Amino acid sequence: MRVVKFGGSSVADAERLRAAAAIVAAHQAQARVVVVVSALASVTDTLLRAAGQIQMGEGAWQATLAKVAERHQAIYRALAGRVPDDFARQWAALLAEAATLPPRDPATELAALEAARFSGWGERLSVPLLALALIAAGTLAEGFTEAPVLLANRDPFALAEPSILATRASLVPRLGPLLLRDGVPVLPGYIARDAEGRATTLGRNGSDYSAAIIAAALGAEALYIYSDVPGIYTADPHRFPDATLLPTLTYAEVRAIAATGAKVLHPRTVEPLVRWGIPLHLRSSFAPDAPGTDVLPDPVLATTVAG
Ligand code: ASP
Ligand code: MG
């Protein structure tokens, strides 16, 4: 089984969602697939802005959220010709949650936590869109909007500590029946639940980390992460045109590169992969067949290099 993760720019609009569906179909021809998806590009930022406006008591939040609704509705129309009733239900639940964000000083830690939790709606909204794109392309698929990653944490302000076993115990019975029919589950990145059952997130850009936790929990043979660049370069390719793509790296090298703040991967992504020895393949969803960066368990890399 492979876990295949798409970042926000890989699902930004109907065309990108169709391209993502084609990538999933190509994987599915070779192995069982579980998909993890980010919010559509820029939606997390917009939801955080809306939460801040609500917390400041600014009426502008309504217009901010309306733009998010319109964007998703336009994609539903492009993919399926209509907006499903499920979207209206989701949106009503989102507005109900917005109403629980009381006006308060948005500089407090608690307000930031509540805003982050609210921003998790971005992934809950993108999951059914990608599931729909897959179904429209003829792939059996189903979206599971509940937070897939379970944490051992009880303190909401502590660093997220994923429980691989609890995540596995909750995912296997939920996804098993669909996987046995060769269907593709689509899961939200970024959002998680703590040991008290409270909704939380893995922090900004946490979907890579989600995908790695899910890959470990399900014993995946590999994790594929699709973004708008094929992999890790010797320098930022947007600033240095001479930068070259690094074809293979070890987990330790990736961890070191991510720790420098280079926007390549959430820095904790490699943690579950190292422990479970799961190879990571970085690719561009804009050129899925082009070479990317392969991050291999260190002994495998040593054998490859020696052989
Ligand atoms: N949507 C979340 C963010 O933008 C998580 C992610 O994309 O990885 O931070
Ligand atoms: Mg994002």
Image: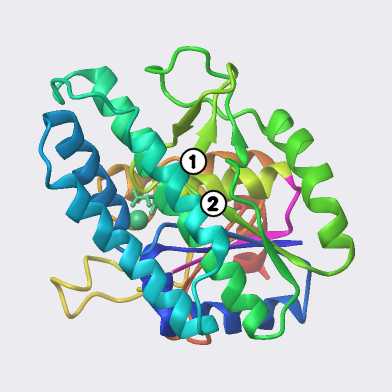
Check if residue 221 falls in the magenta segment.
yes
Quadrant in the rendering for residue 58: top left
**SS state under label 1:** strand
- Identify the colour scheme used: rainbow
Q: Quadrant of the C terminus?
A: bottom right
Between the residue at mark 1 and the residue at mark 2, the CA separation in whole angstroms equals: 7 Å
Disc 2, SS = strand
Relative to 149, residue 79 above or below: below
Q: Position of residue 117 (x, y in %)?
A: 39, 34
x and y, in percent, of residue 306 in the image:
64, 66
Q: Looking at the image, which residue is at 67% across and 33% down?
A: 164
Q: Can you tell which mark lies on residue 191?
A: 1
At label 2, the amino acid type is: Pro
The number of callouts visible is: 2
Q: Position of residue 278 (x, y in %)?
A: 66, 52
Q: Residues within 10 Å of mark 2 (few under 14, many from 20)?
A: many
Which stretch is magenta?
218-226
Please give the label number shown on residue 301: none
**What residue lies at 20% left-to-right and 54% top-to-bottom?**
64
Residue 188, position in %: x, y? 54, 51
Above/below status of 192 relative to 140? above
Question: Magenta stretch containing residue 160, yes or no?
Answer: no
**Residue type at tag 1:** Ile
Instruction: State which quadrant residue 24 falls in.
Output: bottom right
Residue 39's place in the image compared with 238, above or below, is above
- Identify the residue at horizontal 44%, vertical 57% (top origin): 38
Residue indicated by mark 2: 188
Verify CB contact (< 8 Å) between mark 1 and mark 2.
yes
Quarter of the figure with the N terminus: bottom right
Instruction: Decide which of 226, 260 is in the foreground and name it.
Output: 226
